[in-house]
Amino acid sequence: MKNTVTTLQKQKEEGKKISMLTCYDYTTACLMEKAGINAILVGDSLGMTMMGYDDTLPVTMEDMIHHTACVARGLKDVFLVADMPFLSYQTSDYDAVKNAGRLIKEGHAQAVKLEGGASVCRQIEAITKADIPVVAHIGLTPQSINAFGGFKVQGKNEERARQLIEDAKAVEAAGAFMVTLECVPAKLADLITKELHIPTIGIGASAGCDGQVLVYQDMLNMFDGLKPKFVKHYANIGEEMVNAFRAYDEDVKAMSFPEAEHTFKIDEELMEKLSREA
Ligand code: KIV
């Protein structure tokens, strides 16, 4: 069944949880499609996972369009969301609509995601007026890392908790059809989920959210570095890959790869003739 804004909303209403993963390339997109994941996010986390930056701030519209289009070619039923990178929507409503439109037209996404609460409601309204579905993102918003002073849990004191509830209600009123809650205390995420009509997608939030999202390299344990508390490892793909690369390296050096079955034949007489002439 094709996932759409309507089916995702229906899942919330029927209490059926929404699965979402990040993805940045065609091969992985095909595998997630096969697994029956509801939605894919081409996150600007690709700046860190695919490009090796320390944070998401250097990611450009061109990076996002390139990776979104690669993912789109692998999908049939999965709903595709693309992140709007830093300064592609904060600068003006015009920039927000123009850049959201590019992710739809050139990247073939079905919706865009942007970070922020009440402060970006004008942009959310402008983009939804252009009939582009918007996913909001509140709590820990990595594009604000310099303002936050690091990757920290949000909404822990009364003032910040109230602010998060207001932000969630504001983005819903502005027209967002879904909202990501990142690094928010579980009980606060549950309350927000109960208060909103649109689905909430948690990352470092609560099982009570309407769905969950994880960065796929995190859940496959492909990184040696940062291991956030909220990540669960579903496989040790990083270790599997290193073992395979090591085995290949050894085979090549021992000349045990390629074997006869991996090579192509040529007519023996022709080879003899060529050898004589050489
Ligand atoms: O960029 C990203 O991958 C995200 C998720 C972590 C929600 O925004």
Image (spheres, helix red, strand yellow):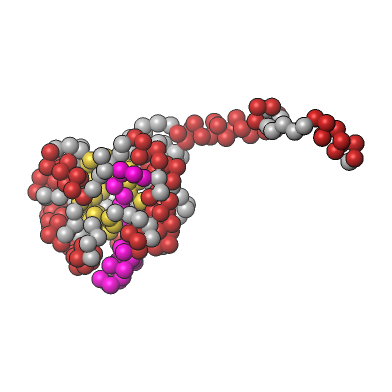
Q: Is 154 or 266 nearer to us in this picture? A: 266
What residue do we see at 35% from left, 61% from top? 105
Q: Is 76 or 138 nearer to us in this picture? A: 76
Work out which quarter of the rendered image holds the C terminus and state it.
top right
Range drawn in magenta: 75-101
Q: Position of residue 139 (x, y in %)?
A: 23, 52
The answer to whether residue 232 is above or below residue 183 is: above
How many numbered tags mark residues here?
Answer: 0
The answer to whether residue 180 is above or below residue 206 is: below
Q: Is 122 or 260 nearer to us in this picture? A: 260
Q: Position of residue 40 (x, y in %)?
A: 32, 46
What residue do we see at 31% from left, 50% from top? 80
Q: Is residue 154 left or right of residue 269?
A: left
The answer to whether residue 241 is above or below residue 84 is: above
Q: Is 81 or 52 nearer to us in this picture? A: 81
Q: Position of residue 33 (x, y in %)?
A: 35, 39
- Residue 132: say if magenta: no
Please say whether residue 55 is visible from this viewpoint: no
Work out which quarter of the rendered image holds the N terminus and state it.
top left
Q: Position of residue 236 (x, y in %)?
A: 43, 32
What residue do we see at 11% from left, 49% from top? 197
Residue 14's quadrant in the figure? top left
Please say whether residue 65 is visible from this viewpoint: yes
What residue do we see at 31% from left, 64% from top? 101
Residue 257's quadrant in the figure? top right
